[in-house]
Amino acid sequence: MPLQILITLVVAGIAGIAALTWALGMATPRRFVSDSEAIAAFAREFPETPVRAVTRCRDGQAALLRTDSGVALVWPMGADSTARLLSRIRVDRTRHGLTLHLPDYTAPRVSLRLPKDEADRWQTLLRQAT
Amino acid sequence: MTDQLTYPDVVQLAVPLFIAAILVELTWIVIRRRGGRYETRDALTSLILGAGNVAEGILLGFVAWGFFMLLWDLTPLDLGAGWWVVALCFVLDDLRYYWVHRFGHRVRWVWASHVNHHSSQHYNLTTALRQTWTGTFTFMMIVRAPLILLGFHPAMVLFCGGLNLIYQFWIHTEAIGRMPRWVEAVMNTPSHHRVHHGRNPRYLDANYAGVFIIWDKLFGTFVPEQDEEKVDYGLVHNLGTFNPIRVAFHEWVGIWRDVTQPGITWRDRLMYCVAPPGWSHDGSRDTSQTIKAKHLTRHPEDAGKPGFS
């Protein structure tokens, strides 16, 4: 197949499929609607680590967990989720909330949109993970 | 002599088919509200990784091709280009695929290349295209050497490899439940391959087949999909990024960091490259075997069942 046609096909195909899924509402990120949902998402990644307490964002976009191994974060990966035990993180205050910088090539940054009072509270909770 | 033998690049020719099939699967899921899930950024990452894989083939394909032609010059054998030779080559190349794929899950150096194919938490036809950008650097082209030394022309071997890859495209779907019994017995199917993409302890390191599931049954790695345990797709520790660069290279970065850390022996450094994924010099991480063992500690009732025997 001539390279020009291949490139056109690939670029148009990728753009078209991405646009179609977006238009069909498939870009909506997951929300954690309950503490137990956040705990279950954490247990998917760390089944051996007991959770002691959960602090969910009011809009459910992420949750901080106090575990036997320290502070952990659960956040959406598209329609799904991932989690990390937090240590040596940097927390930046932004116009919309907080940005967490993790020393992890597979999860370098998590941006959270939080109102001021909630950002204050999360910043305090995150202090022991910095 | 078959020195001038050429075959079409079937993977490139199949690109329109891939796009059409993805649109059909997506339409099916939207209309029927079952049979899988799509997510924009996940699909976009998969498709970009697929495009990158094609680009890598164009840019670095000469490395494997040069190696194969060197072997072809060395071998005194030439099986010709008859249809039965192509058929035999296809079957033997599928056996080659089984072992490369098994190495891809059991040797971290090869896993570093293959891991991105498993990094999606979704399982749809775009996942099939989530292919490696770094396959050349695994040196797994060596596993094809016996085929060429036996007299299968390199162009035929690559043609069969392309057909193998195309076959595997359609099995990356939840829209198909189970195929007729004889198909499930002999061929790799969506059901068998869903198991392979599972991160459930039961499903780890199972069903490495490309086209024929018989290799897994022969070599003891077959695990049937269990109706009572839905497959949970993705990695044991799922990625926190959709960035294709990070997805493509993250395990190589991990190897680099592990190998260059201070205070470990040279044996440890080597083991970080070639031991199974999850190996660590201090035992602080989990391999698939320790994950299964820990699962059985929590769920002793699963002992002896598929995936734990």
Image: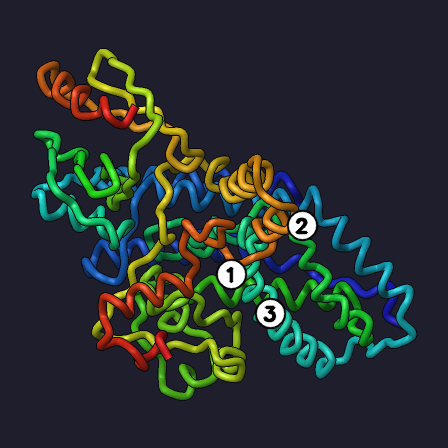
The type of residue carrying mark 2 is: Thr
Using the image as rendered, state which of residue A31 and residue B293 is in the foreground. Answer: B293
- Tell me the residue that label 1 is attached to: B105
Q: Nearer the viewer, mark 2 or mark 3?
A: 3
Image quadrant in which you'd find residue B301: bottom left
Residue drawn 41% across the image and 73% down it = B189
Residue B34 coordinates in the image, percent (x, y): 21, 61
Q: Is residue B63 above or below residue B225?
A: above
- Tell me the residue that label 3 is attached to: B99
Image quadrant in which you'd find residue A57: top left
Residue B172 coordinates in the image, percent (x, y): 40, 62
Q: Nearer the viewer, mark 2 or mark 1?
A: 1
Q: Which mark is residue A108?
A: none
Color style of the picture: rainbow
C-alpha distance separating marks 1 and 3: 10 Å
Residue B108 coordinates in the image, percent (x, y): 55, 54
Q: Is residue A112 above or below residue B194?
A: above
C-alpha distance separating marks 2 and 1: 16 Å
Q: Are marks 1 and 3 in contact (CB under 8 Å)?
A: no
Which of the two labelled residues, at mark 2 and mark 1, occupies the earlier sequence position?
1
Q: Chain of mark 3?
A: B
Which of the two labelled residues, at mark 2 and mark 3, occupies the earlier sequence position?
3
Q: Is residue B12 visible?
A: no
- Tell me the residue that label 2 is attached to: B136
Q: Is residue B165 visible?
A: yes
Residue drawn 11% across the image and 34% down it = A56
C-alpha distance separating marks 2 and 3: 16 Å
Q: Residue furthest toward the top?
A: A95
Q: Are marks 2 and 1 on the same chain?
A: yes
Residue drawn 11% across the image and 38% down it = A54
